[in-house]
Image: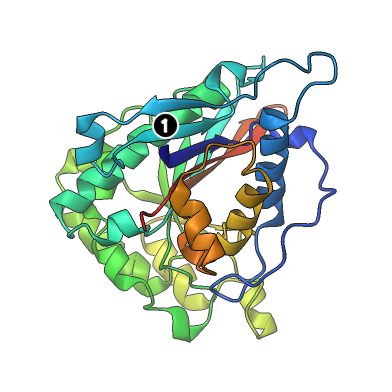
Amino acid sequence: MASTLLLYTQNITRHAISWTPPKGPSSSGENSNTELLHAIHTSLHYALDPCAEHPDEPASFCFSETDEEAEGLGGRKGGQLIVPMESDLKRSKDNDGEVTVKMFFFEPPSLRGTLKGKEREKVQEAWVAEALTALEKATGKKEVWRFVVKLEGVKWDGQEQWEEVGMPEVEDIGGLWATLSTNPLIKNIGVSDFSPKHLYSLYSIIAELPPASAKPVVTDHLNLFDCDSPPCMSPPDAVQMAAAKRGVELVAHPDPHDILPTKAFTALLTEFEDRLPLPESFKTFREAGQVDQAVAARWVVKYTVLIRSRGILVDKGYIVSAEFPQC
């Protein structure tokens, strides 16, 4: 049985939002990302529903065995369930676009048991490598023009009470930043939801890295729309000053901090469990009412492929990596 899951939504610009996601508040109390949940739902239907013209065709999923090296870098012992099969991925024929990636890093049980420092850095390095390989399979493109890092604990929305939340994750970003900086396929690096204090901390960390491992921050993606007071609609002066010190571009984004709520994700997989070889632990946790433990996201990649000179969005999609915690 699978111990991890890799799911491709493929190009979601072809699909209209016409589906109501499973209800239930996320752990942060925010609304869930309807776009991502809908895309996962559509992808599962595409991969698993029988074709009317070819009803005997098998469902589109496969297994990839986890090797010993991957296990040592945060991989789970056992197979990986891949949906749909990578041979069934449909890439855009236009290959001239510029790729932007936003990678959401989560704290699944396997990572929470990993010590900080070198061991944690190796896990995140393996995740980035896995994500870039999956991105190439989904889009046919290797080079990433802009790679934006979203840390799970960092959720500043312009309000003072969130200014230092997630600071330990920021202070531990040095190894990840070096990994991204030394990858020749990643041209620029940005962050998401960093407060002025987060930015100043990151500047200090980058300053201590070797020059070859210390690409500058080019952008800070901010979601200031959910805060309580109208001034949050524009970046506070403090973050504008912090960004200006290093020439960081401030960009608005609509993504919720809890982009993939566990309860909604569990509900989606439950809908298809009679057609997916999910591990027994998934059903055990769910039936015990422990839906938050049935599946855990490791990372989510949100990508766009844009032909900037023509203003055309060629491709947009998500890639989801998750693990099934053991009972």
x and y percentages locating residue 22 in the rendered image: 72, 60
289 vs 177, left or right, is right
Residue shown at the point (51%, 67%) measured from the top left: 288
Mark 1 packing: few (<14 Cα in 10 Å), some, or many (20+)?
A: many
Q: Is residue 245 visible?
A: yes
Residue matched to label 1: 132
Would you say 175 lies left or right of 194 here? Answer: left
Q: Nearer the viewer, residue 142 or 244?
A: 142
Count of numbered tags: 1
Task: Judge left or right: residue 52 versus residue 88.
Answer: right
Residue 61 image position (x, y, % from top left): 56, 27
**Residue at x 54%, y 37% (from the top left corner):** 7
The answer to whether residue 298 is seen in the rendering is no
Q: Specify the amino acid type for callout 1.
A: Leu
Residue appearing at x 50%, y 65% in the figure: 292
Using the rendered view, name the quadrant where residue 315 is placed: top right
Residue toward you, 61 or 18? 61
**Residue occupying the point 46% across, 86% down:** 161
Image location of residue 107, percent across then percent down: 37, 60
Image quadrant occupied by the C terminus? bottom left
**Front residue of this view, candidates 213 and 236:** 213
In the displayed structure, would residue 71 be above or below residue 58? below
Could you tell me which secondary element the residue under label 1 belongs to?
Answer: helix
Residue 286: give x, y in percent of width and height. 54, 61
Above or below, 123 against 34 in this view is above
Left or right: residue 130 versus residue 252 is left
Q: Quadrant of the N terminus?
A: top left
